Amino acid sequence: MRRWLFGGRASSFADMTDLPKSLRDALQAEFTFWTTTVATHSRADDGTEKLLLELHDRQRIECVLLRDGERRTVCISSQVGCAMGCVFCASGIDGVVRNLTTGEILEQLLRLARLLPATERISHIVVMGMGEPLANLDRLLPALAVAQDPEGMGISQRRITISTVGLPPGIERLVTENPGYHLAVSLHAADDELRTRLVPVNRAIGLAEVMEAADRYWEVSGRRLTFEYVLLGGVNDSPAQARDLVRLLGGRAALVNVIPYNSVEGLPWKEPSTTARERFLEVLREAGVNVQVRRRKGARIDAACGQLRRISARAAAAEAVIPRADIASPAG
Ligand code: SF4
């Protein structure tokens, strides 16, 4: 069963053709193969595919398959919604609904794996979808353990990235329990005042504590840290702010991922201009910071986290009011 599930791409117990028929029938009668259903499946021209999955309680989550050269990276969610409240993010707008279970986290991997042809496998995992992964480590870590297991999906731990706003207790737990993952800490601003505006949870933590926890992780794991910085037009993209970031990094051997903002319908934040973006990058590069710009993939299918879920929720709400509107409007 394990082989069928993780390597064989079975999508039902009936597919497990080397099991006795009576056992397959018994499994079919007693268990549910999938706990999610695919609400929508979209594919962009660049090969990015996105699934909106509906959970047993009708909540919806998103997960994405990205194709980049030989890489087959999946981006998965860890919670329904998110409590961190980053002001530019569609996932956090309505707060957190609940944690995903270990099974629901794994199921995203299994569903995405089945989008690949038999000759390809998932090579990298990023836990960067909806939710704050370090707020749900109890369920995430067992799911990632199965992903790593040679008898599971066999994905090297070094190819798994956990992305966080930087919750020090969660980082500390990884330090003591499992420091082998690649950690990506989202900064988005290099001063506390702006960061608290953009990432409200920062008010209770503060950048100094985030950087201290990140340093601890680096010391123990020996793995280079990545800092994420979503570049918002006219908000955090000035040369002075780039210099603040250089100061904050203080010569750490880190990679800075600059992510030009992907505009979200209904939110006021803008993409940075090309000039602002290039100026920002120039300051970092001139200071010797190792920087890369994350290319946007799948923009046409709303691949930024939380967008598809919100659009589908709005569509469902619109559908729900259509009959009432029909009755109420004399114009029909
Ligand atoms: S950016 Fe990440 S941490 Fe922030 S609200 Fe969105 S999902 Fe949560």
Image: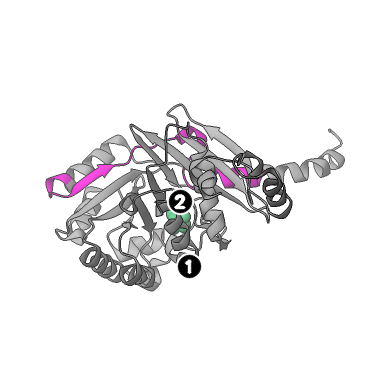
For the residues labelled 2 and 1, the Cα–Cα distance comes to: 19 Å
Q: Which residue is at 32% across, 52% downward?
A: 228
Q: Nearer the viewer, residue 165 or 62?
A: 62
Q: Place residue 101 in its image quadrant.
A: bottom right
78 within the magenta span = no
- Residue 138's disc is 1
Q: Is disc 1 placed on a helix, strand or loop? A: helix
Question: Residue 152 has which mark?
Answer: 2
Name the disc covering residue 276, or none: none
Q: Are marks 2 and 1 in contact (CB under 8 Å)?
A: no
Residue 60 x, y percent position in the rendering: 61, 50
Q: Amino acid at mark 2?
A: Gly
Going 38% across and 56% down the picture, which residue do you hit?
Answer: 162
> What residue lies at 28% left-to-right and 69% top-to-bottom?
213
Residue 1 seen in the figure: yes
Answer above or below: position of 65 versus 125.
Answer: above
Q: Which residues are magenta?
A: 285-314
Q: Is mark 2 within 8 Å of ligand 1?
A: no
Tell me, yes or no, if residue 266 can be seen here. Answer: no
